[in-house]
Image (tube, grey):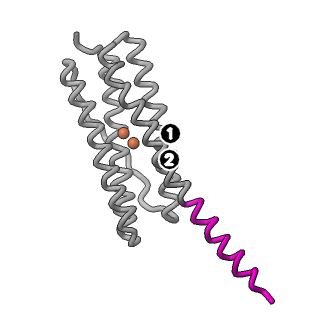
Amino acid sequence: MNMTKKMQDAFNAQIAAEMWSSNLYLQMAFWFRKEGWKGFSSWMFKQSEEERQHAMDMAQFVLRRGGEVCLTAIEAVKTSWADAKEAFVDTLAHEQNVTGLINRLADVADEEKDRASQNFIAKYIDEQVEEERNVQDILDSFAHLSSHAVAHIDSHLAQRQ
Ligand SMILES: [Fe+2]
Ligand SMILES: [Fe+2]
């Protein structure tokens, strides 16, 4: 059975959101490279590729189900950040937002009683748990770094005669 028009439109909106995510992380990769952060830059290139892959996977699913894929204009993304940590704070906020979008996509599949779409979307619900965890872990590392710096100041001040 083909997917309904409502389901198709919801997938097309999600495909646009995944492409926007891909552009956001690609821009972060460029910005990190310019700032001299090669590791962060390569992580963001991979993240950008993964988001594009999500868009492709969803597009192929829509086509398999007899739907039509319509690409839309993608809004511009932010182009620079104050520092590395701020880029990851933005990344977490963005992934939390995407989790909300995926949940709404699942709501549409429920409303349409579309079992195949429910099954397909389930892996993205799992994926968002991983995405949020991974970025939170990176942010936690930044927090540990700053407490390391505070400990360094503390031991330095302990040397006062
Ligand atoms: Fe994604
Ligand atoms: Fe993501």
- Residue 8 is drawn in which quadrant? top left
Quarter holding the C terminus?
A: bottom right
Q: Looking at numbered disc 1 in the image, what kind of residue is underneath it?
A: Gln
Which residue is painted at 49% across and 38% down in the image? 97
The spot of residue 131 in percent (x, y) is 43, 42
Mark 2: secondary structure: helix
Q: Please report the bounds of the magenta region as a residue range.
A: 142-161
Which residue is painted at 41% across and 71% down in the image? 35
The quadrant of the rendered image in which ligand 2 is seen is top left
* Viewer-proximal residue among 113 and 7: 113
Q: Is 52 on the left-hand or right-hand side of 44?
A: left
The residue labelled by disc 1 is: 96
The spot of residue 36 in percent (x, y) is 38, 72
Q: Looking at numbered disc 2 in the image, what kind of residue is underneath it?
A: Leu
| Numbered circle sitting on residue 92 | 2
In magenta stretch: residue 143: yes
Q: Is 157 on the left-hand or right-hand side of 113?
A: right
